[in-house]
Image (tube, helix red, strand yellow):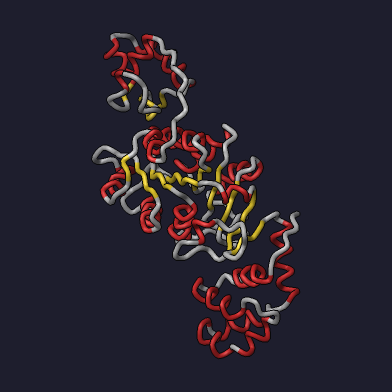
Amino acid sequence: MINVKYTADELCLIWLDSFLGLEYKHKQALYKLISGKVEIKEVLVKGKEYVVSAIGSDRYDALLHSANQEYLNSVIEGLSRKNVTALTITSKDYPFLLKNTDIPPLVLYALGDLKLLSTDCFSIVGSRKSLPLSINLAKEFALGISDAGFTVVTGNAEGVESAVIESLLNKNKKVISVLAGGIDNVYPKSNTELIERVINSNGLVISEYPPEVEVKRYHYPIRNRILAGLSKGVLIVSGGVKSGTTYTAEYALEYGRDVFAIPYSVGVPSGAGCNAVIKEGGHLCDSVNDVLDFYGIEPKQKEELNLSETEREIIKVLNGGGTHIEKIATALNKRVFELTPTLSVMEIKGLVVRTGVNTYGLTRNDLEE
């Protein structure tokens, strides 16, 4: 259990944010009306006509009924029991870049290392349905960008975002995961353990919703403004033309952030959104060095790969795209059983991945031909 001392302004915003039925604009208006006033109930009574006209009599009655220290204490104690810190737009630790966007969350509910919010952040997002090569590129970019000194920000969806988180945790790197629902309601449920790993490894999990709020479909595009708002740059790894990832790119462009996207061949549904982002002014990016060069950062030297002659020959074949093992064998004038051990070793090395039944593709685009 944590014990955070909140200012009067912070308490006012936390109190307002606990009323889930209130729209953002109404919370803003009420905060301006109440902020700095000691007796909230007295202010509500005096301003009844205005408040009722804005939010209706039922919601007004709920506010009035809960305008007491007992209710506020129960909200704060509930957060404390879960070790959740509430950062409001008046809090000193509230992230500067996000605060200076059009609609910053009035409150961020955070669990983990708050210091990460004051570091240089870079977002990586992608589709749930992504090619194996895209998943591996996301991991490669995440590690390269983290090594360059950025804190990587992502969501928590299956596919690219889960892969980004896992790759960073496996290397003891810092990551911020932004949830679309409350911290108590991780979705998909299968990622609950992954999010717990983020928290327990000195990463950070944040949401603009109180912990008990269940995720709704419409939360995702709203959430994506936070991914863009927190970060200096955003990389779109994959996504359809009308996907959540392209919403993130739109927010980033609107906020004047640096936007990067991985290019795709014509006809790849999970890459159409990336190509659209590039057309709209995003930077074409097929290597992590493209991002690092943009920021004037020297990339770390990669370890030299010690490849056998057979591995080199397989890489040459796979540079044309995913290929069935029988076609690889034909191209190398070998039998399938002769190649199986080599391909297994290459999988362990992280050089190739199975993209289908007995079909293999490269995990990286920088392997020598």
As drawn, the residue found furthest toward the left would be: 266
Query: Could you tell me which residue is drawn at 47 percent across and 52 percent down?
Result: 227
Question: In this rendering, is residue 62 above or below 254?
Answer: below
Q: Indicate the position of residue 368 as horizontal and vertical percent values.
A: 34, 19
Q: Indicate the position of residue 35 as horizontal and vertical percent values.
A: 62, 76
**In the rendered view of the protein, which quadrant contains the C terminus?**
top left
**Looking at this view, is 87 or 196 the one in front?**
87
Question: In this rendering, is residue 303 above or below 192?
Answer: above
Query: Could you tell me which residue is drawn at 64 percent across and 71 percent down?
Result: 9
**In the rendered view of the protein, which quadrant contains the N terminus?**
bottom right
Query: Could you tell me which residue is drawn at 25 percent across and 41 percent down?
Result: 267
Q: Indicate the position of residue 347 as horizontal and vertical percent values.
A: 45, 22
Query: Could you tell me which residue is drawn at 46 percent across and 24 percent down?
Result: 301
Give the side of residue 161 with respect to residue 321, left or right. right
**Looking at this view, is 185 or 31 the one in front?**
31
Q: Quadrant of residue 36?
A: bottom right
Q: Indicate the position of residue 98 as horizontal and vertical percent values.
A: 50, 58
**Numbered-mark total:** 0
Give the side of residue 10 with respect to residue 304, left or right. right
Give the side of residue 42 with respect to residue 313, left or right. right
Question: In this rendering, is residue 66 above or below 196?
Answer: below
Question: In this rendering, is residue 224 above or below 27?
Answer: above
Give the side of residue 101 with respect to residue 6, left or right. left
